[in-house]
């Protein structure tokens, strides 16, 4: 019958509309902001910079623990070019103790960011991740939406709180990488010690005379 589909659609809409007064599962909206739906783990809004704190909840060492080494790959790959990085003149230890540059300046203009996550995907240091915070309205259209490195910094504990599955995988990867580097350094130190010992105590040469 002509219009059969329209009638069926209207019946379904009416069923959901009236049903929402009596059945909680038909209520697809909440009274925001008093009521909030938990944010999905896969949600993404704007990027933040991860730092490793010495102890959980320690926010004082955001710069010391910052994973970013100012390699500028994300800045180059960001499609709308809204990341601005200046490399430090000096270096600081990274999470394995290796001396690395760090960003003297790291800004993201979130009024331009399109939440594509490309910066996260290209970062070789697990240093930039996507936040789920979306209540960022401000009357300052320019300065208020240009976040500097301190405003962008969040602890690894925070990362775990919003993306627990992903953060646990990242921790495991970093721990594996760290263990490999430590084993390599240990093997190199042992080889150097053995070489030094051999040089200090040369093996006696066998007498050649008859
Ligand atoms: S999410 Fe995309 S647009 Fe935003 S800073 Fe990262 S790369 Fe740039
Ligand atoms: S966030 Fe990652 S890709 Fe971007 S500069 Fe820092 S280390 Fe490099």
Image (spheres, grey):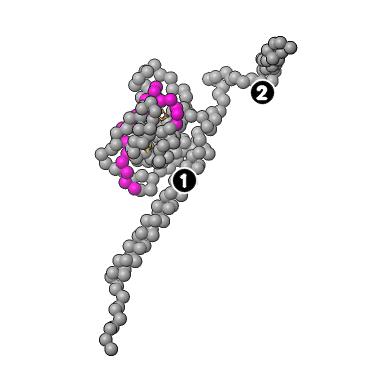
With respect to residue 40, does 98 lie above or below? below
Q: Is residue 79 magenta?
A: no
- Is residue 135 something that shows in the picture? yes
Q: Based on the displayed image, in which of its 4 quarters is residue 53 positioned?
A: top left
- Secondary element at tag 2: helix
Q: Residues within 10 Å of mark 1 (few under 14, many from 20)?
A: few
Residue at 38%, 45% (x, y): give it: 95
Give the residue at the far right of this rendering.
1
Residue at 39%, 22% (x, y): give it: 111
- Considering depth in this image, is 94 or 123 the residue closer to the camera? 123
- The residue labelled by disc 1 is 173
- The residue labelled by disc 2 is 25
Q: Residues within 10 Å of mark 2 (few under 14, many from 20)?
A: few
Residue at 39%, 56% (x, y): give it: 184
Q: Based on the displayed image, in which of its 4 quarters is residue 49 positioned?
A: top left
- Secondary element at tag 1: helix
Distance from the alpha carbon under mark 1 to that under mark 2: 40 Å
Determine whether the beta carbon of the residue marked 2 sits less than 8 angstroms from the nearest atom of ligand 1: no
Residue extent of the magenta highlight: 98-117
Q: Position of residue 142 (x, y in %)?
A: 35, 20
Q: Position of residue 56 (x, y in %)?
A: 45, 40
- Judged from the image, the quadrant occupied by ligand 2 is top left
| N-term mark: 1 or 2 | 2
Residue at 26%, 86% (x, y): give it: 209
Q: Left or right: where does residue 101 sit relative to residue 12?
A: left
- Is residue 60 something that shows in the picture? no
Q: Position of residue 103 (x, y in %)?
A: 32, 36
Determine whether the beta carbon of the residue marked 1 sits less than 8 angstroms from the nearest atom of ligand 2: no
């Amino acid at each position: 019958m002509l219009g059969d589909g329209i009638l069926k659609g209207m019946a379904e809409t009416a069923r959901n509309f009236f049903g929402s007064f009596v059945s909680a599962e038909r209520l697809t909206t909440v009274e925001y902001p008093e009521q909030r739906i938990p944010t999905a783990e896969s949600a993404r809004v704007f990027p933040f910079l991860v730092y490793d704190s010495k102890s959980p909840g320690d926010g004082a060492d955001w710069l010391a623990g910052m994973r970013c080494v100012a390699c500028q790959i994300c800045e180059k790959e960001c499609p709308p070019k809204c990341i601005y990085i200046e490399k430090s003149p000096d270096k600081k230890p990274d999470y394995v103790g290796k001396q690395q540059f760090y960003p003297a300046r790291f800004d993201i203009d979130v009024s331009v960011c399109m939440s594509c996550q490309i910066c996260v995907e290209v970062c070789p240091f697990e240093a930039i991740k996507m936040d789920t915070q979306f209540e960022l309205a401000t009357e300052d259209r320019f300065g208020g939406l240009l976040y500097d490195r301190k405003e962008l910094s969040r602890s690894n504990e925070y990362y775990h709180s919003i993306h627990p599955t992903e953060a646990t995988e990242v921790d495991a990867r970093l721990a594996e990488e760290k263990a490999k580097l430590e084993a390599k350094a240990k093997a190199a130190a042992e080889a150097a010690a053995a070489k030094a010992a051999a040089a200090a105590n040369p093996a006696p040469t066998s007498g050649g005379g008859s």
